[in-house]
Amino acid sequence: MLEVEAIGGLAWIAHNGGELDRAVELYEEELEGARELGFSWFIALASANLAECHLELGHLEAAEGHGLDALAVASEIDDQRHTAWILLVLAMAAVRRGDPERGGRLAGAAEAKRARDGLGWSEADYNLWTAELPTGDPAFEAGRAAGLRLSLEEAAAEELAQRDAT
């Protein structure tokens, strides 16, 4: 397990250092190790980090795929902090794909959870994760209003049901 954690640490360093391709390689290695161990929390974390890296690289399909995988695992283990973060990553991917209403719904659900429970996020992290969201866009704001009324579990279940339907 320590090896998987160390690989994840190296991936995080590469990611934050802007070496996104290297970070993807290392997060994939971390994910493989986490799966071998059957450690759900690390599976969710590595998948979420892969989603974020792919989003930064502009690989929207890969970002959504890893994001939905992370969402499924985080939801299964009731990891609400990571579920909310993953919803924000998926919100950014939706907006970039041209679906601001879906992006707003996902961001709204994460925002509502953060307002209720804090989630331990710094203001800087939250601002970083939401900086690209098109606040003020009518479709985004309509989705956001709907998302604010959803629980985190409802938003995650809707996303996963939509994935399973396709």
Image (cartoon, grey):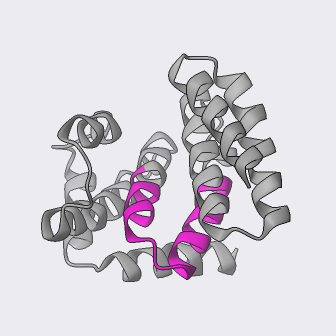
Q: Quadrant of residue 166?
A: bottom right
Q: Position of residue 86 (x, y in %)?
A: 47, 57
Q: Position of residue 141 (x, y in %)?
A: 20, 55
Q: Quadrant of residue 76?
A: bottom right
Q: Is residue 112 rendered magenta in the image? A: no
- The residue positioned 20% from the left and 78% from the top of the image is 149
- The residue positioned 39% from the left and 81% from the top of the image is 153
- The residue positioned 20% from the left and 43% from the top of the image is 135
Against 45, is 145 above or below? Answer: below
- In which quadrant will I find the N terminus? bottom right
119 left or right of 16?
Answer: left
67 left or right of 2?
Answer: left
Q: Position of residue 127 (x, y in %)?
A: 24, 37
What's drawn in magenta, residue-wise?
Answer: 65-88
Name the main secondary structure of what is drawn in magenta: helix
Against 85, is 54 above or below? Answer: above
- The residue positioned 49% from the left and 81% from the top of the image is 157
Closest to the observer: 77 or 94? 77
Q: Position of residue 144 (x, y in %)?
A: 23, 61
93 left or right of 103?
Answer: right
- Residue furthest out toward the front: 2
Q: Is residue 74 rendered magenta in the image? A: yes
154 left or right of 72?
Answer: left
Closest to the observer: 136 or 109? 109
Against 16, is 151 above or below? Answer: below
**How many numbered discs?**
0
Q: Quadrant of residue 42?
A: bottom right
